[in-house]
Image (tube, rainbow, N blue to C red):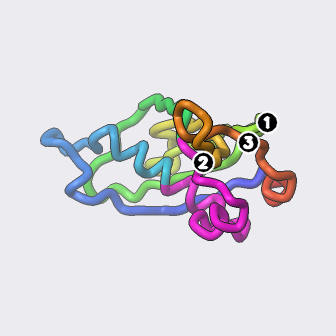
Amino acid sequence: MKSNRYDMTVPWGDCDPADIVFYPNYFRWFENGTTELFASVGLELPQMFKDHGILGIPILDAHAKFMRPSRFRNVITVESAIESWGNSSFKVIHKIYNGGVEAVIGHEVRGWVVIDETHVSGIRAVCVPDDIRARFD
């Protein structure tokens, strides 16, 4: 399974008054992890959307389990990988390490969607192309 890691230092503005990372920031870092994972296989999201005629890869489900706090100036590592592919969706798993220990684990399930004005929501899911999947093998 292809994975990507990046390190970051927790900024002051991402912490709550107890000096612990405010939980929504982990979901932002998951988003960054997905973006960097795609970039690591040569897929910059805006160009990929254009090249494949899709609107985007919206989140259908997200989850996080918090096991250890991270604080201001901790250096954390965000690791992301595609765990599985569906027909028109995929699951990205994320692990955040603090001091080499798992602090947060989570996932995003994302859809591969196009604009469809005939659909009630204005969008619809379509098959993830094989050439996209192959980059992560």
| Helix, strand or loop for the magenta stretch, by majority | helix
Left or right, 133 with respect to 43, comes to right
- The residue drawn where x is 26% and y is 51% is 14
Query: Alpha-carbon neighbours of circle 3 within 10 Å: few (<14), some, or many (≥20)?
Result: some
- The residue drawn where x is 36% and y is 62% is 9
Left or right, 32 with respect to 47, comes to left
The secondary element bearing badge 3 is classed as: loop
- Residue 87's label in the rendered image is 1
Please state which amino acid type lies under the numbered disc 1. Answer: Asn
Discs 3/1, front: 3
The residue to which callout 2 is attached is 115
Q: Is 51 within the magenta?
A: yes
The residue to which callout 3 is attached is 126
The secondary element bearing badge 2 is classed as: strand
- Counting residues from the start of the chain, the first of labels 3 and 1 encountered is 1
Residue 127, by quadrant, is top right
Residue 32: give x, y in percent of width and height: 49, 56
Question: What whole-number distance in Å separates the C-alpha atoms at marks 3 and 1?
Answer: 8 Å
Question: What whole-number distance in Å separates the C-alpha atoms at marks 3 and 2?
Answer: 10 Å
Boundaries of the magenta span: 32-58
Tell me: residue 39, above or below residue 110: below
